[in-house]
Amino acid sequence: MAHSFPIPWQQRFQHWLQTYPEAVAAVTCGLLTLLGWLALVGNWIGMGIWVLLAAYVIGGFDSAQEGVTTLWQERELDVDLLMIVAAVGAATLGLWQRQYYLLVDGAVLILIFAISGALESIAMHRTERNIRSLMQLAPDRARVMVQGQEQMVATQQLRVGDRILIKPGELVPTDGLIQEGHSAVNQAPLTGESIPVEKVIGDEVFAGTINGNGALTVELHKSPESSLIQRVIRLVEQAKTSAPPSQQFLETFERGYAKVVVGVGLLLALLPPLLLQWSWETTIYRALIFLVVASPCALMAAIMPTLLSGIARGARQGILFKDGAQLETMGQVQAIAFDKTGTLTTGILQVSDLIPAPSVDANRVLQMAASLEAYSEHPIAEAIVQAAQRQNLPLLPTRAVQAEIGQGISGTLEDRVVRLGKPAFVMADAAVATAATAAPKVLKEEGELPPALCQASQRLEREGKTVIWVSQQQQVLGLLAVADQVRPTALSLLSNLRQLGINATVMLTGDNDVTAQTVAKSVGVDTVYANLLPEDKVTAIQHLQQQYRTVAMVGDGINDAPALAQASVGIAMGGAGSDVALETADIVLMADRLEKLEQAIRIGKHSQRIIRQNIAIALISIALLMVANFLGELTLPAGVLGHEGSTLLVTLNGLRLLRN
């Protein structure tokens, strides 16, 4: 009894038919064309004609349908219809003159056109496959901890506040903050980082990354739909459907160009027999070849495959281009403006200097300062506590802690009053503490402070750092300096940008001029604008655009969003960036890696070079084929081969961007 289960070759055929229908049609068209030619050679004329006509239908159906639809609905001619007209014209001429080899020429035209379309489809499928692979990064299920018990639930059912357990070697199901454990997480699938990143309590992990050898308990702080990987997928899908200005121009140009080609083709078919006494057969044949070789297929394929390949390559390396237009613009950038905090700097305060008074232990100063600051939620306090934790210094019992706004914090440690803050505050005793807050200038007497520490304090303040004095019972123990740390890669990045042809680098910040100049000097920024409000940053971008035309803006905060929108191309830091900045920006540097900016510019410039090459190849090919046709040295199959060969060449050239 026969069974209905598909056999392996049927499964393979169904897979190809569903995935590459253009390739299946092209292969079928090729087989029918060969059979038709063999039938004509064997003098089976009737059979040969019908087989060749079948090849026409199977190989040219999609192109004919698309061309007729465009003509009917939009009253426009396109390249597909030109090819079909040329093929049908060859078949008609062959049947009329009983020169049946012309049917083979037309079938070969459709075959080569179908093969070219199939190869382009396969090439673009490869690009889309790179993009779709992002969707497979995050697992479908997660291990949720409920009252100490593990429960497997679908990722889509996770809610903010859920705690999930991620065992060693597992994929992270969604973005979250580590609550327990530490591990080295492989972020290469999402950000392109080659080395696993150490993650500790409080750090964020991203969906689709791979946990190392430590178990992690992660709490969801955003819904799974808002995870970084889901944003990447949505924006890349959006990028696939948007055409850059150059592509829009070419599409508009194609419609007008096709009309010109048809008009010239009609003149070439009619005028030579009437004016030069050429034979109708020769004239119509040359006109059909003209329709083929003059079609701008290669020109139309010069841009989008290149840009889609660049988008896919960027996604693999942790750079999200929201559409091809911004990839194109990125290759034309002449000046780049940077926000300071969170962009050129880490945006996280750290203890940069610790200077004890003579005969005082530095660790003792840090331990006492951290013991007091543990009761404060101020960012400076957090930096001091974290510095003590890195030194493994235990916090001391503290009581009677009191913070004075704008002055400092005080408390009792080991039965002694310890103070942190401004000089006048730390030198005040308990009896005049209130007066110290009210009139710090009166109480501040430089003679009461160690001269060496005063000089160090002045130097640190000139460097844009915040200085915190520490005293015990009015005796100065030392001082700490806290500063936002410059990104380690910022200096080398700006140097490399100049080598890439960036003419100006500018820093825009709302911070004071002293701090701004210090950071600018350390990273090598050309120009600094300080004390800026959000609207001032927009004005600065407009001024740069007047001078340099194409200007990029790199930022991360809500206050950067207007400037990101104003810039020719806005670039957001993906890790530390606010949601507003991420939505406003055109490009997102994932995992908070500023050095990805250089790679983004390189991809943009590389795509521009390839597009210029493709346009040159397309125009030269069209010109050479037209000259050969007018000289009478070109057959219809040769014209089709040259025309479709140039189209395939520019497509494959564009796909070079997929290579690292």
Image (spheres, rainbow, N blue to C red):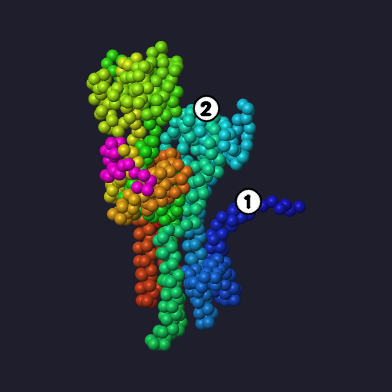
Across and down, in percent, residue 97 comes to 51, 82
Is residue 520 inside the magenta stretch?
Answer: yes
How many C-alpha atoms fall within 10 Å of the one at disc 2: few (<14), some, or many (≥20)? Answer: some
The span shown in magenta is 513-536
Residue at 35% over, 17% down: 429
Residue at 50% over, 76% down: 90
Is any atom of residue 427 visible in this view? yes
Residues 166 and 359: in front is 359
Across and down, in percent, residue 440 comes to 31, 25
Q: Amino acid at mark 2?
A: Glu
As drawn, 199 above or below 634: above
Disc 1 target residue: 8
Q: Quadrant of residue 285?
A: bottom left
As drawn, 569 above or below 440: below
Disc 2 target residue: 180
Q: Quadrant of residue 296?
A: bottom left
Ranked by sequence position, the earlier of labels 1 and 2 is 1
Q: Amino acid at mark 1?
A: Pro
